[in-house]
Image (cartoon, coloured by chain):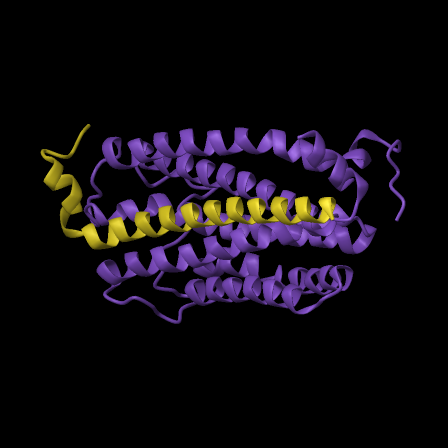
Amino acid sequence: MMDKQSASPWMRYASPATFYPLAGTLQPWFAGLAALLTLAGLWIGFFVAPTDATQGEGYRIIFVHVPASWMSMVIYCAMAFWAGIGLAFNTRLSSMMASALAPTGAMFALLSLVTGSLWGKPMWGTWWVWDARLTSELILFFLYLGFLALQAAIEDPKRADRAGAVLALVGVVNVPIIYFSVKWWNTLHQGATISMTKSPSMAMTMLWGMLLMALAFWMYSIAVALARVRNIILERERHADWVRQTLENA
Amino acid sequence: MMQWNSVGEFFAMGGYAFYVWGSFGACALAMLVESLLLRQQRAELLRSLKDQHEA
């Protein structure tokens, strides 16, 4: 495969050999930001945000439930984007990015379901209902699992990337379904927490706590995806000369 | 601002302790496990690459 190292600075970073050290430099910064934002978010979430008028202290689950749910959707879109770029332009690194995002996305989809269940039990009286929001999020979790299983089942990495990309791209239609499910169908799940058209219905401090936690989860996801893509690069490029040189110089 | 009068009240979460701490605990555990697995995976990779380069 040709690496057009001199084509443009952006093309240069599309090469695993250049991206590997860059990801290594960036990773600790994102991890540090994630830790700081988590501390700030937890402080506001538990000590500044007031008790909710109807849900008491139980509503505080929102500070992890909404960020986890958002990340499960954002990561899916990012994964489908990189998988699609890899499929269209045959860029190795894009497909590796998609593979690096999948496990973290699956984790957040599961956390969204678990924390939602823990919220639903005391508020609705049930752990689970087959309503549109919950069911479409469950489908998102299965799409992640399908992507991971498909990639694991195909030995040749290039074929695995292509098959995974097709699945990821087909599944992307599910994301707007999740998002708009509370509008399109009559569901038990409450409406969108944040709306672009209405002024926020929740106390400002609650909103800030949630946004800080969402940002923290976002930074965490980037840090973890960078760490994982570095592992994937090492694994897939294990016979390349640059890997040997990089490790010997480290 | 502060709505807790005691440490016990804080941990009780107004009767929702299991649900609130269960949610936060699940998230913390998942993130901790994922981070540790990645670190372990990297250590194993580096070891096997070292063997490969020495061979």
Taking the view exactly as shown, the residue that stands out farthest to the front is B55
Seen at 35% across and 35% down, the residue is: A209
- B53 w.r.t. A21: above or below: below
The C terminus of chain A lies in quadrant: top right
Between residues A179 and A198, which one lies in front from this camera angle?
Answer: A179
Q: Is residue B47 left or right of residue A95?
A: left
Say whether residue A78 is visible: no
Q: Is residue A42 left or right of residue A147?
A: left
Q: Quadrant of residue A45?
A: top left
The colour one sees for chain A in the rendered image is: purple
Q: Which chain is yellow?
A: B
Seen at 73% across and 44% down, the residue is: B53
Taking the view exactly as shown, the residue that stands out farthest to the bottom is A130
Q: Is residue A85 left or right of residue B5?
A: right
Seen at 52% across and 51% down, the residue is: A104
- A31 w.r.t. B32: above or below: above
